[in-house]
Image: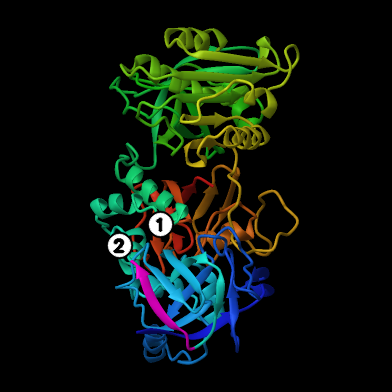
Amino acid sequence: MATLVSVNVGRPKDVPWQGRTIFTGVWKRPVSGPVTARRHNLDGDGQGDTAGHGGEQRAVLVYQLDSYRHWHHRLGLAPDDYGQFGENLTVDGLPDAEVCVGDRYRIGEAEFEVTQPRVTCYRVGLRLGVPEMAALLVSHHRPGFYMRVLREGRVRAGDAIVRIGTGPGTLSIAEADSLLYLPEPDLARVRVATGIAALSPGWQGSFRDMLTAAATPPPAWTGFRPLRVAAVVPENASVTSIRLADPSGSALPVARPGQYLTLRLPGNGPVRSYSLSTTGEDTYRITVKREGPASRYLTGDVRPGASLDTAAPRGDFFLADGDAPVLLLSAGIGLTPVLAMLHHLAAAPANREVWWIHAARSPAEHPLRAEAHALAAALNARVHVFYSATTGRLTAARLAELALPSCADAYVCGPDAFMADMGTALAAAGLDAARIHTEAFAARAAVNPGLVARPARPPHEPDGEPGTGPRVTFARSGLTVPFPATGSLLDLADACDVPTRWSCRTGVCHTCETPLLSGEVTYSPEPLEPPAAGNTLVCCARPATDVVLDL
């Protein structure tokens, strides 16, 4: 019979790390006597990053005595410093290869249900002084697991652990961890995982994303290739559409409605991305608003016959197949990817319910208005256009009045504040957060779990002497700098205050996976699973040539 060896708790605290401050609760210490397990935590415990740790689905973290012995022999870690892996419950028994998602256990007065493996996180490496620990936990199939509390009650060291129920899908913790983090996952088993109700929503979403990625073709070409400007069409005083064609006259690869093109302007000019405003034709069309040097060049200086270096269509903001209602919400120039979706829906045989909701200042500042209305009419779509100068702004309250279908897939594009407000309003209207999709034109919001916020700076060249390595272009941030002698692409982005997204910083979780628009990289250390075609893992990558990243 399994036994509870130690109960460990700890309050989050500030910890220095690589010149930054981490607010983390990974430092746990054993408690003598009983501790009450609550719905969201153990009494006396806390987490610094509640987005990835703690809460109902991750109330208690479990790690096994057998794994303590394993790491003692492999790494020389203390075999009895309980809590050093950040766990709340150190147990004798319950191996990851045998415990399944949905298994239920009684410990002392409390009852628990297994919800997911441990999240791969750099902080366990920080706690142990082993930076690659997140990768080792996965590669050695010893992650540990989280449980939620079904019945609150007291637990204490020495309590017996009694299994009172088994999971429905016989998906072990070790298998679930391997499916998400190791190469060549069995997609049939991934589909099984998405149907296990006890699996936490976060892991269900990750597995759904895997299935979507597996069905998504890689970029149509690598790097940049020259495309010929076939037409330049002013849409209004500040917006121009540019149609791009293959110089040979061949049809261009089909893009998915909602994706974008990245252009490199002549003479090692800036690199910028623009949404496609139509798809499904032999050429590409982008629609550009004049508001900066790059867009001024495109809307004022480019003429038919010119050549523009162009990367293949990319982006995970695209219209998904299906028969659910479609909600398209746009503001200003955010109309462009939504317009591509309207074109696709109008050309498709599927009979889907379509809503198009748009916000602009006035009809004069609503580019491609007639085209959008004609497509919406052909689709018999429900159309609601709000002009702030005349009919008033589109607000959450006005959106709620429309009685939107809660089973819809929603696509939202516009300024950041608009997308945030509409996302909140759609969720309040009953839409599943997983079905609300947004697309940002500029750098995406950073996701750096546990880092204590510091005053924001716009992207800039790194302090100190400039590097002498290959040129690194952060396309969304509009910055090109030489690579320094040491570090990774993520380290350089951090030094430049380029917004990044990462979790474990060892490439295991692929949170840092970023489109590599051009160039080649090397890895140190090698990731457990390579990134998808056309992407790179910036946390462990170094440029072998000049590179352009979608950051």
Image quarter of the N terminus: bottom left
Marks 1,2: beta carbons within 8 A: yes
Q: Position of residue 55 (x, y in %)?
A: 57, 61
Q: Is 517 above or below relative to 229?
A: below
Is disc 2 placed on a helix, strand or loop? Answer: loop
Determine the image quadrant of residue 385.
Answer: top right
Write down the region rendered in magenta. 158-165
The reply to whether the magenta stretch includes residue 425 is no
Q: Which residue is mark 2?
A: 171
The residues tagged by marks 1 and 2 sit, at their Cα atoms, a distance apart of: 10 Å
In the image, is 346 to the left or to the right of 6? left
Prevailing secondary structure of the magenta residues: strand
In the image, is 173 to the left or to the right of 441? left
Disc on res. 199: 1
Mark 1 belongs to which amino acid? Answer: Leu
Which numbered disc flags the more N-terminal residue, 1 or 2?
2
Q: Residues within 10 Å of mark 1 (few under 14, many from 20)?
A: many
